[in-house]
Image (spheres, coloured by chain):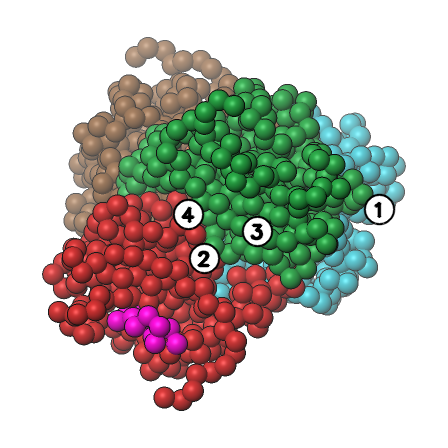
Chain colours: A green, B red, C cyan, D brown
Amino acid sequence: MPTAPTRILFIGDLVGGLGRRTLLGLLPGLRAAHAPTFVVVNGENVAGGLGITPKIADELFAAGVDVITLGNHTYHRREIYPYLDDHDAILRPANYLATQPGHGHCVVERDGVRLGVVNLSGNVFLRAGRPAFTEVDSILGRLEGKADLVLVDIHAEATSEKVALGWYLDGEVTAVVGTHTHVPTADLRVLPKGTAYITDVGMTGPRGGVIGVKKEQAIESLRTMMNVRFDTSEEDPWLMGVLVTADPDRPGRALSIEQLLVPWDGTAPAAD
Amino acid sequence: MPTAPTRILFIGDLVGGLGRRTLLGLLPGLRAAHAPTFVVVNGENVAGGLGITPKIADELFAAGVDVITLGNHTYHRREIYPYLDDHDAILRPANYLATQPGHGHCVVERDGVRLGVVNLSGNVFLRAGRPAFTEVDSILGRLEGKADLVLVDIHAEATSEKVALGWYLDGEVTAVVGTHTHVPTADLRVLPKGTAYITDVGMTGPRGGVIGVKKEQAIESLRTMMNVRFDTSEEDPWLMGVLVTADPDRPGRALSIEQLLVPWDGTAPAAD
Amino acid sequence: MPTAPTRILFIGDLVGGLGRRTLLGLLPGLRAAHAPTFVVVNGENVAGGLGITPKIADELFAAGVDVITLGNHTYHRREIYPYLDDHDAILRPANYLATQPGHGHCVVERDGVRLGVVNLSGNVFLRAGRPAFTEVDSILGRLEGKADLVLVDIHAEATSEKVALGWYLDGEVTAVVGTHTHVPTADLRVLPKGTAYITDVGMTGPRGGVIGVKKEQAIESLRTMMNVRFDTSEEDPWLMGVLVTADPDRPGRALSIEQLLVPWDGTAPAAD
Amino acid sequence: MPTAPTRILFIGDLVGGLGRRTLLGLLPGLRAAHAPTFVVVNGENVAGGLGITPKIADELFAAGVDVITLGNHTYHRREIYPYLDDHDAILRPANYLATQPGHGHCVVERDGVRLGVVNLSGNVFLRAGRPAFTEVDSILGRLEGKADLVLVDIHAEATSEKVALGWYLDGEVTAVVGTHTHVPTADLRVLPKGTAYITDVGMTGPRGGVIGVKKEQAIESLRTMMNVRFDTSEEDPWLMGVLVTADPDRPGRALSIEQLLVPWDGTAPAAD
Ligand SMILES: [Fe+2]
Ligand SMILES: [Fe+2]
Ligand SMILES: [Fe+2]
Ligand SMILES: [Fe+2]
Ligand SMILES: [Fe+2]
Ligand SMILES: [Fe+2]
Ligand SMILES: [Fe+2]
Ligand SMILES: [Fe+2]
């Protein structure tokens, strides 16, 4: 049994090489400051803005990331398909079809604590083979007795789906954290029955763009309604995440959720 | 010329009778604490969750609201149509068709300061007759020389549209504030050229529901995929807004933007 | 074994009371002319344009309709929910959730021939809990050995989904007939492996409206972008359907598919 | 004044090289059989399934096509942008933004008859800067006195928009023909006030695919919900179009509309 409370650091969608470098640059300092037991990262935009590659996933795991979650851009890169099947700790939404590469939940263990992570996709404005709300019931059933804490990443556009899922799982899991919009929300809190909740964690990468894209290109696209090439912005890198602290007195529940919005000055950490 | 800096209090979508009462209950205290020159309120959900009526609009104006903005639920109540045409200070999105009731911008004056307010609808996932980005150019042209400060309420679902509009108008207006998702975002700041920005201000009303709806009903709807009657939640009222302070040294620009997330204890203010 | 070839008369979405009367008025003549073994009718719009009631379903069955299929308007009327569970021969899309009222396939028998009917919903632009393409595999497995002929009603908006389903099931079922757009298509044919196909059968009801709605109201809605009340048109009733003839030499396959586009003069049939 | 009635041959979306070859292969025979005064072709999918190039447009005009209309794939190929501005007789939807390349209507003259052609995009499920219904009013105003006949190509997904536009323009133009779904409809007729109408003309190209795409790829995409590469099918080429005959007794109105669904045997016409 751990003497310090268990902490989960969850970091929002890494966008492009800048997002990856921002994470790698800031993670040692965040570890020193917050001593997270687990680090979970959404990586659906890390490969040039769309998808993820085996090389990048390996790099993230090597940097100490425990679990990578994904979202609607999961399958942008074909080379990740077998990797998704072969590696337990990288997840695509659980409510995708069983025949799609990969799987949607896993359990990782650190310091004698077992963390279950579940990745879900919203069904409004997004394409997922099964409904999130019924799928999560089934997965929580399968996780029963196998995880001490459970974190759910709900990757969705509509605030209604995310807020409702938070209420639905209040008291059932340790945390429900939203991703996908790339904008952090100001509604984080521990819900009445002990589940930490936030509608969107935000993204990690160029805050100086438009949810990751060069701002000039995003504006031109919206102004002209023409096809515009989108590149990843390189301006103003920030890491956006939350730190969830487990409640030592209530198994599987959260004591607190704190928001981490951290600019990166571009300095890589000293080699350890 | 005002001696104190001009402040604009903008308050997110009032939801139902509880949203209205929360505003009326908290406004005197907010006035006392922040001395806003102008109060602007989004009222698209104030009549039972959908739309607004003349009676409620009158009540809001009587309480000292300077401008009411609206959104996709503008036309839910037929009795508001002539009111929208007859009253300058209630706005529906400017990029709706010219033939639709009402208008999309106005100028109000307090203490010798003229505030232009523009209401826009996003075009992604929402139905608006004209594109927001070209419409706003035309309206800002018409406001030139007629307003000292300009606030834009961009009522939209997609974060990309709102963030891009903020960048597009940076240096052109005093503030770009987003509405519609009913969840406040944690990205408020003054952009480099002096425009205050936030992706979503949030809502004013029952935080204990799902973006305004009773949480049990919202969950049932998502779990069962059946038609479920939606009622306005009555749980846990909060006011959500932002306070924009004009920059005394840079005409038309913002000095700061602060977030107001205020629970209401249900006490009506003492009669003044 | 039947001496005459088995024929299935499939009739597109009945719209409103006029659609119901058109069917009842024309069915005796169609029976006389074509001697269909089975009559299958899509009834998702028969109750005032939206949904169906037990009373109307009873009336259709009493008139000799063998199976009623439905679609996205299935659950508009609450009173039909228990009826959907209690009656085998009224179907809602099979790829809705198992928890939703009703079921998605049935087998009916006439003259010693067993007809399986499957109702599916498209997944593009429409909300269905499961994908049509995987669901249909599972249902055809369950029907194996239990039906001599199988007809699939794919209720969908996108032509791509419907055409693809026709190709996918070619050689597997007797007929794939599309519904939902209310406009009959001119692409009916027997596909190479023996499955009769049409992208959309059309509707039965007021051809003088806009897919069932009074044309003045539909035009006003599109021109003004305002909320307009929709009533069912009463102009120019037509019955739209197809007649599928089973191939006596190839079990479960179709010999032909013919289009029936029949105006109704408003005369009820003489009592039999 | 022409002695024979004026006829307009309108041909639905050419899909890929096969679509182009099918048109070129069949056009001489269609000219011989029907003596159309004007030939109008939708070319939005002619360049490998998406868009059009200057070279192909030149080839179509050289083959005697009078006007090319387009749709949602107009801007897929960048090299067409200046061509759209420089050539009167190639149209993109008129209700796109004025700043987008090209224009949405033109007048061509043959045998002393002036044909106005208008290209519109639907607003439901498709992205167009302005509403079709108000735009068409403005264009018909500009065409007044400048065209003897007017044909409108409404490129749209939803049947409601197309049927409503037909009714809206009945008596105002010679023909309203729908495109985009790639499936021909069986509802063609001359409406009561003299406007020829069809909801969709269909496509010209591989009927053996799924609205133009190889059927195996389309099925795989829908079954697996994975990203699947789409190639243009090469199976079973057909030309789909309509022949509208002007009414010699009612200026600007139609006498008849006939459907042309013609398989192509792959034989190029003898050189003339
Ligand atoms: Fe993302
Ligand atoms: Fe995403
Ligand atoms: Fe709202
Ligand atoms: Fe809204
Ligand atoms: Fe229907
Ligand atoms: Fe339908
Ligand atoms: Fe097309
Ligand atoms: Fe198209």
Q: Name the residue under label 3.
A: A257
Pointer 4 with pointer 3, Cβ within 8 A: no
**Disc 1, SS:** strand
Quadrant hosting residue A78:
top right
Q: In this view, does B162 lie above or below D29?
A: below
Residue A26 placement, left or right of B111: right
The residue stretch that appears in magenta: B29-40
**Disc 2, SS:** loop
On whether residue B125 falls in the magenta region, the answer is: no
Q: Which of marks 2 and 1 is in front?
A: 2
Q: Camera-side residue: B77 or D58?
A: B77
Label 3 Cα crowd, 10 Å radius (few <14 / some 14-19 / many 20+): many
Q: Nearer the viewer, mark 2 or mark 3?
A: 3
Q: Find residue D258 and report its horizontal and vertical position in percent.
A: 42, 39
Q: Is residue A92 above or below residue D160?
A: above
Q: Name the residue under label 2.
A: B184
Q: Find residue C231 and report its horizontal and vertical position in percent.
A: 50, 66
Q: Quadrant of the N terminus of chain B?
A: bottom left
| Residues flagged by tags 4 and 2 on a common chain | yes
Q: Which of marks 4 and 3 is in front?
A: 3
* Measured Cα–Cα span from mark 4 to mark 1: 55 Å
Pointer 2 with pointer 1, Cβ within 8 A: no
Q: Which amino acid, mark 3?
A: Ile
Q: Name the residue under label 4.
A: B159
Q: Is residue B233 above or below residue B257?
A: below
